[in-house]
Image (cartoon, rainbow, N blue to C red):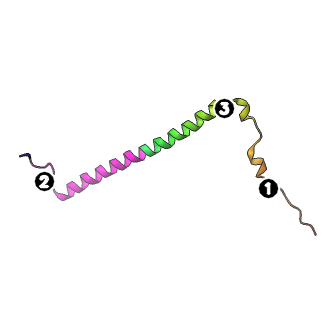
Amino acid sequence: MSDKEFVYDNEHPTIRLRVWMLGQMIWGAFLGGIFILAIAAVLVAIWLAGMLLPERSKEGPSPFSAIEMTQVDAVV
């Protein structure tokens, strides 16, 4: 197809391995960044949905009051 040699044909195998590993690390960092941005987008969407709610809906009693433990006295 081409008279040109492949770029890495004349390089030492260690150099080729290092270039491959660097490419893999960069690709992993890219995918990790996309994952973090997706989580941030979900959190921003939840925050924006909360900002659209009326102020009165934010003034209700705490939903955690039903979870609080009550002290029970032992009957002797």
Find numbered disc 2 in the image and state the secondary structure of the residue it sits on: loop
Q: Which residue is mark 3?
A: 53
Query: Closer to the camera, 73 or 50?
Result: 50
Q: Is residue 65 above or below residue 48?
A: below
Q: Earlier in the sequence, mark 1 or mark 3?
A: 3
Q: Is residue 13 left or right of residue 74?
A: left
Q: Residue at x 58, y 33 (%)?
A: 48
Q: Are marks 3 and 2 in contact (CB under 8 Å)?
A: no
Where does residue 51 sit, x and y in percent of width and height? 63, 31
Where does residue 34 sit, x and y in percent of width and height? 42, 43
For marks 1 and 3, give the CA distance: 31 Å
Q: Which residue is mark 1?
A: 69
For marks 2 and 1, give the CA distance: 72 Å
Rendered image quadrant of residue 12: bottom left
Rendered image quadrant of residue 54: top right
Find numbered disc 1 in the image and state the secondary structure of the residue it sits on: loop
Q: Residue at x 84, y 58 (%)?
A: 71
Q: Which contiguous range is marked in magenta?
A: 4-33
User: Within the magenta stretch, is there residue 22?
Assistant: yes
Q: Which residue is mark 2?
A: 9
User: Within the magenta stretch, is there residue 23?
Assistant: yes
- Amino acid residing under circle 1: Met
